[in-house]
Image (cartoon, rainbow, N blue to C red):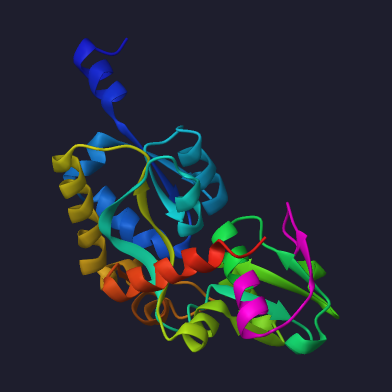
Amino acid sequence: MLPLRAKINQLAKIKVGIVNYLNTKPFLYGLENSEVYEEIDLVPDYPANVAAMLLENKIDVGLVPVAILPRLEESYIITDYCIGCDGEVASVCLFSDVPLDEVETILFDYQSRTSANLLKILLERFWKKETRYVDTRDDYRSRISGTTAGLVIGDRCLAFRPQAKYIYDLGDAWKQFTGLPFVFATWISNKKLPVDFIARFNAASKLGIDNIDEVAKLNRIDYYDSDHYFKKNIQYKLDEYKMEGMKLFLNYLETIK
């Protein structure tokens, strides 16, 4: 049996949902090498599931798609960091065998609703393209052929890039459309947390970003340049310009079905 103090500490741990993608490795590095790691229980999953857990109060904090914000009764952005981009993101792309104007059907990645909603906004307002949407519940990459395109995110997206005929990068398209950066996910809590915990958690995020060279070195992949991905494609600082881009996205989100 656990001693009483250990039981109390275990019960008091803050549940933190995180995505198991390459782009979250700096945050994992920071958490695992900081004092706040002893205060949390990490719950890994893909973005849509982490969002669902935050909505259902099964976790206290999540690195979640920003599209969840309007659905939370109570929400707080608790760090100065995010998963964002200012142009090409590389890991959120629409893949197709044919040019976009010939696409008839688009398969949506079940792992993230923010990316799906971003694509809908871009299709309607930037590309002016009408098409049929199909939600998926499995790995559908083999079904991307002919006039059927597919939105793929995360590590699976990076792995699929070498075999794609046409690649439409959603980060790049958003930048062309709005002139602003895009925020895919940020650290959000569904309740007020202790100020000192938030400070330690923010410091852990900073630690990971400050050691981005080491993170890239530890996470080499065969199918994409990890240095370029961590240092050029993904931007981690949640600055005023990314906040502006996020607010614009949330405004557009209200207009789509």
Q: Nearer the viewer, residue 76 or 206?
A: 76
In this rendering, position of residue 5 left or right of residue 131:
left
Figure check: 237 above or below 11 = below
| Residue in the picture at 74% in, 86% down | 100
Q: How many labels does the image show?
A: 0
Nearer-the-camera pick, 32 or 44: 44
Viewer-side residue, 163 vs 244: 244
Quadrant in which the C terminus appears = bottom right
Q: Is residue 140 magenta?
A: yes
- Picture quarter with the N terminus: top left
Q: Where is residue 23 in the image (x, y as percent from the top left)?
A: 42, 65
Q: Whole-percent x and y of residue 186?
A: 38, 58
Is residue 37 found left or right of 54 in the rendered image? Answer: left
Residue 185 seen in the current view: yes
**Magenta part of the chain:** 120-141
Residue 145, by quadrant, is bottom right
Residue 130 image offset from top left, x and y in percent: 77, 77
